[in-house]
Image (tube, rainbow, N blue to C red):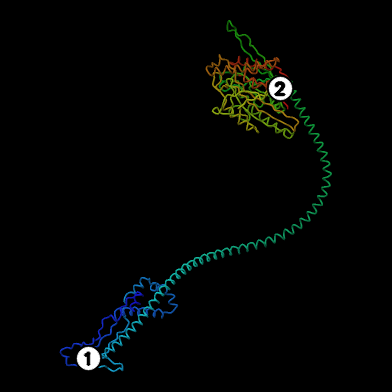
Amino acid sequence: MEQKGNADGWQVPLIGKALSQLPVPGLRAKRGPSDENQPPTEQKRARRLPVPTRRVAASIAATCSKASAAAAVPRTQRAGRRASLRPELTIPAASVADVVSRPVPVAAAPKMAAPALAAGNDGKKRAAWDLKGQLNDMRTKVSSYKDKVQRLDGENQQLKRQLQEQVVQNRELSSQVSTLSSALHTCQEQAQQRLHEVMELSDLKQQLEEQVTSHSRTIGQLEGIKQDLSSLLETREVKLKLAEEGLAQRECENKELRGQVAAQLQVMTQQEERLHHLEMERRRLHNLVQELKGNIRVFCRVRPLLAWEKERQKGLEHLHFPLQDNKALVLSKVEESHVGRDRKGDVKYDFSFDRVFSPACSQEEVFEEIALLVQSALDGYHVCIFAYGQTGSGKTYTMEGPDDMSPETMGMIPRAVRQVFQGARELEPKGWQYRFTANFLEIYNESLRDLLVGRPERGAELEIKRVSQSSEELHVPNLRYVPVDSEDEVLKLLQTAKANRSVAKTALNDRSSRSHSLFQLRIEGWNRSRDLHSVLLSLVDLAGSERLDKSFSKGERLRETQAINASLSTLGLVIMALSNKEPHIPYRNSKLTYLLQNSLGGNSKMLMFVNISPLEENLSESLNSLRFASKVNECVIGTAQANRK
């Protein structure tokens, strides 16, 4: 038993090694002084088990009581209270080993009282003096106790093994319970998710049922509409059959009409051809009339007095406009005697031009006289119109108009542009197509400046060059050429150019133009491969001529005046050379004449405005301008020819 107990971890001392209270043979119990003469009595001894055995018995008894109590609980209650009993059933291995290793007191085992007197095998009571018999009886009892202890020890070992198995089972059950709890939690989450999905599907089902109901109503309505349409279709089919019968009848009528239309188209083609020939004849006659008037025509215009000038001069007594002749102008000058103050007669200077405009004439009246000339540009002729005169005589007003321009005060340039675009639109139904390109420059001190580009953006100085060696056409590289499609686009360019032009204040004019401005509109037209031409409409506002003794120009103004007068003199020389048919024409003596070379020659039509001041103090300058204009008006430079390709 000692070896077995050590093997199981139990330390149970052998019963034989415990202290014994049995009487030892050869020894006699002591008696008191009063009992010496009494016979020996059997002492009552309480039979006590060894301490370890008592502890083991107590532990076994406690375990058995718990097991009995657990077995007495119904299965349903045990299942419900499993979670609360789990801490008691789940016993760590270390705690179990500690409980088993400790001696367990046998608390529940009843104490066995020793018999007062030893009894023999036959159950009779032994005498007190029969010590040997009592000893044998005691040995027999000890042997039976040993057997009982061994049996209890085996039961204890068996209970320990059951307890360990129960602990293992509890652990397995705990793990299973944990696994089942997690699985239960997962199942609950899935159940919640499925419940949510079921609710969504229920809502979707309800929506679909509503849609089905709505679609059912719609289908019912469509069925009704279908029936209506079917009846309408039957009605339309009947009408269609009637229409087809009518169409067949109309087709027969159309065949007859086609023959008539073909004949009319042939007549219209012939009329269109005739109209084209008539248009060509009109152009020829128009240009013939212009040629009969002279290739270089001169119009004279006298500007009205300004408000502040009317205070200095009363009337226009030195200017006379014959009522019966709108081509004549008479200037009168009072001459005094050289020896005294006696007055001689008035000296009159008679001039005649193609047209003379008094100060009362409006811009519209002036343009009516040059409208036919502008029309020649659409017919394929180079046209040049320029204004000449002293500074302050109204050249810029005549060509461009005032700063606050209105439809009544528009100058010749915007009016000419408007007529060109209007004429191009009128000729479109006749098969003519046009493309327009505009540029605007000034000649300042014999240098070219692009007026469509601001001064900070201007690059190198511009030069005049030929397009090619075999062509007489000139162009200015790096000059801005702007394609235009309407009158408004050209008017915007005119505003830009007016803002960039060089002007300055002089003694004769507060806003004197210090350069020649040149607006050119290139017109390219073609008509169904019959005709193609490319011409230039040049409109020039010349700088005003000045006398140095009256303008008092100095420094920069003096250089400007000298350059202006030199270019105007060159213009006169070129016109005289063209009129005299001289072999050499000095175009290159001035940038102005060189640039206008193709517009001043015999293949162009030219008109000059001579503008004079109404002030009597400017009479000498007016006479010089009118004399120069008379020479130009007498020039015949040949018949102009259309520029066709």
According to the picture, the residue beneath numbered tag 2 turns out to be 603
Instruction: Work out whether mark 2 precedes mark 1 in sequence or the reverse, and give the earlier one.
Output: 1
Q: Which one is nearer the viewer's eye here, 261 or 38?
A: 38
Crowding near the residue tagged with mark 2, few <14, some 14–19, many ≥20 C-alpha atoms within 10 Å:
some
Secondary structure at badge 1 equals loop
Residue 433 relative to residue 84: left or right: right
**Vertical arrangement, residue 36 with respect to residue 382, above or below:** below
Quarter occupied by residue 351? top right
Residue 455 relative to residue 105: left or right: right
Crowding near the residue tagged with mark 1, few <14, some 14–19, many ≥20 C-alpha atoms within 10 Å:
few
Residue projecting furthest to the left: 33
What distance separates the C-alpha of mark 2 from that of mark 1? 182 Å
Q: Position of residue 121 (x, y in %)?
A: 31, 92
Q: Position of residue 36 (x, y in %)?
A: 17, 91
Q: Position of residue 595 (x, y in %)?
A: 64, 22
Residue 307 relative to residue 330: left or right: left
The quarter of the picture where the C terminus appears is top right
Quarter occupied by residue 172? bottom left
Tag shown at residue 41:
1
Q: Tag 2: residue type?
A: Asn
Q: Tag 1: residue type?
A: Thr
Q: Residue at left 53%, top 19%?
A: 556
The quarter of the picture where the N terminus appears is bottom left
